[in-house]
Amino acid sequence: MTHFLLGTSGLPYHLPAFADIDDADYAPAFQEGTATQLAAISAITSDPEPPTFDNTLVPLELSGVGLRRMLAIFFNKASADTNPAIDALRADFAPRLAAHFDAIRHDRALFERLQAVHAQRASLDPEQRYLVERYVTEFVQAGAALDEADQARLAAANAALSEKETAFELALQADANDLAVLVDDGAELDGLTPGEVSAARAAAQARGLDQGYLLTLVLPTAHPHLASLTDRDLRRRLHQAQAARGRRGNAHDTRELAMEILRLRAERATLLGYANHAALVTHDNTAGTPAEVRRMLTRLAEPAARNARAEHHALSKAAGFDVQPWDWAYYAEQVRAADYDVDLAALRPWFEAERVLHDGVFRAATELFGLSFTERADLHGYHPEVRVFEVAEADGTPVGLYLLDLYTRDSKRGGAWMSSFVDHATLLDTSTAVVFNNLNVPKPAPGEATLLTFDETSTLFHEFGHALHGLLGGATYPKLAGTNVFRDFVEYPSQVNEMWMLWPSILAGYAVHHETGEPMPPSVVARLEAAATFNEGFGTSEYLAAALLDLAWHELPGDQVPRDVAAVERFETETLEEVGLALPAVPPRYSTPYFAHAFCAGYASAYYSYIWSEVLDADTEAWFKANGGPTRANGEAFRRHVLGIAGTTDPLASYQAWRGRPAPLEPLLARRGLV
């Protein structure tokens, strides 16, 4: 355990000593960490003194420090640089970890002490009061108030769930690797940039292939290469590979796992007194109920589908045939270029990764918050490709470390994400944070520039918004630090950060042609803005379809979850037909067999969170535009009311105190062209 504990590495900011951690260290650290935490809980419950905040909540927050540290390192390793040994450990840890946390949350003596402190909450300061309220709510939702028999059934369901969710993720990653598209003739890659071609060749070489090019798969249904590849048959092959994941009837088929996960979640919800899993999840989020979520999603579905059908007609007219899913992105770029004189693929030379990072992403944070970023070549991450940056306030006060893991590899799961190794929690004597971003950008050949797509650039800004939340969100107590907020609020700060990608003063600083040094012409920027709602019918429809599938699956009682995996596609079709989103050319962003967000990544019944948070985001963007953009004064206001509060208070209450009202829906409707 010593490798994982705070401060033992001797590295600044409590950066983990990754070089000293071997795969064999995780199992004994897990055993020691769980035992140590249970001993700490036993000390709390055996304390003969009456329960107080100091003798109950404080030691509860301090318990498991080493375990939490180890798990943060391990689960990032399992996601960003896994191997068969780590996969086996993850499968082994999953049910044991579920049982460990159930043992804590089902400890009746501990729950009674929490309730006693909760009864004293009027005497606590606001952060202490919010902490005990969160604990009591979460313990109740975890089954603390159930009798022993129901707790035992719940614990069994949780253990089985942890096994199934882990198996889903491992199977999906294995199938995605297996389905990567091999291209023999480089001429078929016409339309891709030299960097993308070299990345495909490098991916093939990494698999030990002497010839050919390998197109690795990404998490969403729509692969970014579909916008560029001129070979229609290769586009079809690539799309069909994306859509085939988890549904081929092989050892990596995820459908039965998904149905088992749904039945277990429904059983758990019933035990806890909820109608279904969606009701359980939304009850402890800002949405409140599944009905509120469905009300918003269905309100958006009709105009989104209407716009998508109009877009499909226009694209089919331009193509001269009925556009299929593998054609959509390609002809959308043709129409975008014709109607708006904007070719997103042609913009890549202006999105060189190093400039985007330093002169775009970092610069926006400097202008807003006064932060500085200094690369520390002497500090090392968990993989040779990880870069480490020291972050400081304008006056030099340390903020923490930011780690960036940009490139895709077979050992990394798909998608993009942020998490932390160390949170700013003063109870632990950690007044700084260590956060990291993971992306999946294809790595070009040595010596070639990394040119980001438009979407990859937006994703980097988005994920860095999460990183800022983790860096600036300080708290006294670890449970409330960083991004530990409601699931349907956590995307809001990251969505706001996307705004700076095309903000004129920020864009001018980084959008420089990597060969000629010429800035992106202002006319291009103007055309990008004019085309802001172009193809939004597609984008909104594919997102809403996935969000509604997630909600519909999790509104089912356990006895209504299909037993036959062949019923999965039928359920998807019927669900989307009901809301008018069964659009053959616009498949859902995620289909059930590869819907990682819903079945293994913590967004079950909560994939709606992105558009729910976007209501706040769109309102905030309007506020920044009306008040002068990325100024220090505006940044400090956003930091004070959003980023800086972390999870120490009700985030919507803080937002409304800042804005003087709830966020209206109209800015979102306008942004997405739904008015």
Image (cartoon, helix red, strand yellow):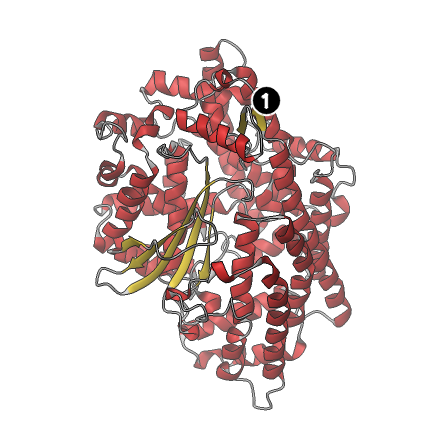
Quarter where residue 122 is shown: bottom left
Quarter where residue 326 is shown: top right
Residue 203: give x, y in percent of width and height. Answer: 52, 33
Residue 107: give x, y in percent of width and height. Answer: 66, 75
Confirm whether residue 288 shows in the render: no
Give above or below for 283 relative to 131. above
Residue 330: give x, y in percent of width and height. Answer: 46, 20
Give above or below for 180 relative to 421. above
Q: Which residue is mark 1?
A: 237
Most foreground residue, 399 or 137: 399
Residue placed furthest toward the top: 320
Point out the image quarter for the N terminus.
Answer: bottom right
Point out the image quarter for the C terminus.
Answer: top left
| Label 1: which secondary element | helix
| Residue at (44, 28) in percent of width and height | 198
Residue placed furthest toward the front: 210
Most foreground residue, 673 or 48: 48
Q: Is residue 150 left or right of residue 19?
A: right
Residue 669: give x, y in percent of width and height. Answer: 40, 36
Most foreground residue, 129 or 464: 464
Q: Is residue 253 left or right of residue 468?
A: right
Q: Is residue 55 left or right of residue 509?
A: right
Q: Is residue 4 left or right of residue 472?
A: right
Give, as a three-letter code, the residue at label 1: Arg
Could you classify mark 1 by the number of other residues whose Cα lies within 10 Å: few (under 14), some (14-19), or many (20 or more)?
A: some
| Residue at (26, 60) in percent of width and height | 393
| Residue at (61, 60) in percent of width and height | 24
Most foreground residue, 200 or 309: 200
